[in-house]
Image: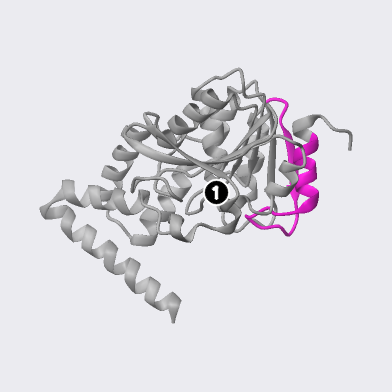
Amino acid sequence: MKKALYFIFTKSVGLYINGMSYAFPEKANQLAYSIFSKPRKGKITLDKLPKTLTSATIEMVESDGEQYATYTWKGNDTVILLVHGWESNSARWKKTLPYLKETGSTIIAIDGPAHGLSSGTEFNIPKYAAAIDIVVKRHKVSFLIGHSFGGKTCLYYQSHYPNTTVKKVVTLGAPSEFNTILNNYTHLLRLNNRIVSGLVQKCVAVSKIELNQFTGANFATSLSTKGLVAHDVDDSIVAYKEGQAIAAAWKGAVFVQTNGLGHGLHDDALYNTIISFLFDLEK
């Protein structure tokens, strides 16, 4: 029943946008982009803050007129920044945090644009990276750990904001191809060619890069930062081959294949592998 309703809803939205494209093309293109870039979930409120985040010190940082929430668990001078993915928030690190805290490090998590306690209605990687840059510089971050789109944002950040304080980056289930995501969206709504063309132009204007170059693998090719790429063979959200492509393009990166963890990649052994990588511990 839910699948049938979802099909009817997406088809109706697509028909509406397609119809609008003939009389009001600019409004139709803007609506198509707004739906594409606006998360449907992931927002939280202070009065219903997830328990995981209540023990953190919450601060807001401003970037391009938007407010971004950060959560800090104070430790020593080694700072780890956690970067969540699409339709998520900093509470997604609930299972990871205990392992990172054992290292004695200062842990900071950030809510992406239009997620968690952060402001805005539009999510895009350049916005996310600009906010990350403020946190990295302010707190002299040593390590970045990003999940899903957060992982791709870390790659974008390191390739566009070279920063000597970041020594290592970990990506978990990160996507590489942007065109795949865009094509899935336009196919789901069955958008016509004039809308697809306008949507592509809008995405290029936002990213300032041609979409065939807006890939995790392309960002990784320019990195000298040490990296670990983890991806699960059973990931039903981001294909395993995308993780392989990022690792192949990233010179010297460690590739970790997992089995049965899906897209979430929550696992004691994997956490320990990440910590060993970050702190050069013997296995």
Q: For this rendering, which residue is in front, 155 or 65?
A: 65
Q: Is residue 148 left or right of residue 16?
A: right
Q: Secondary structure at mark 1?
A: helix
- Could you tell me the amino acid type at mark 1? Ser
Reading the image, the residue beneath label 1 is 90
Q: Quadrant of the N terminus?
A: bottom left
Residue farthest along the bottom direction in this orientation? 1
Hey, which quadrant is residue 103 in on the image? top right
In the image, residue 275 lies in the stretch drawn in magenta: yes
Residue farthest along the top direction in this orientation? 164
Instruction: Give the crowd class for mark 1: few <14, some 14-19, many >=20 residues within 10 Å.
Output: many
Residue farthest along the left direction in this orientation? 23
How many numbered marks have been drawn onto this rendered protein structure? 1
Q: Is residue 256 left or right of residue 49?
A: right
Which residue corresponds to the image point at 69% horizontal and 43% vertical from the top-left?
Answer: 230
Which residue corresponds to the image point at 45% horizontal and 33% vertical from the top-left?
Answer: 131
Q: Position of residue 273 (x, y in %)?
A: 79, 42
Q: Quadrant of the C terminus?
A: top right
Q: Position of residue 264 (x, y in %)?
A: 64, 55
Magenta residues (range): 251-276
Which residue corresponds to the image point at 52% horizontal and 47% vertical from the top-left?
Answer: 85
Q: Position of residue 166 (x, y in %)?
A: 62, 24
Q: Position of residue 76 (x, y in %)?
A: 70, 30
Q: Is residue 85 above or below residue 220?
A: below
Q: For this rendering, which residue is in front, 159 or 73?
A: 73
In the image, residue 283 lies in the stretch drawn in magenta: no
Residue 213 seen in render? no
Which residue corresponds to the image point at 31% horizontal and 33% vertical from the top-left?
Answer: 205
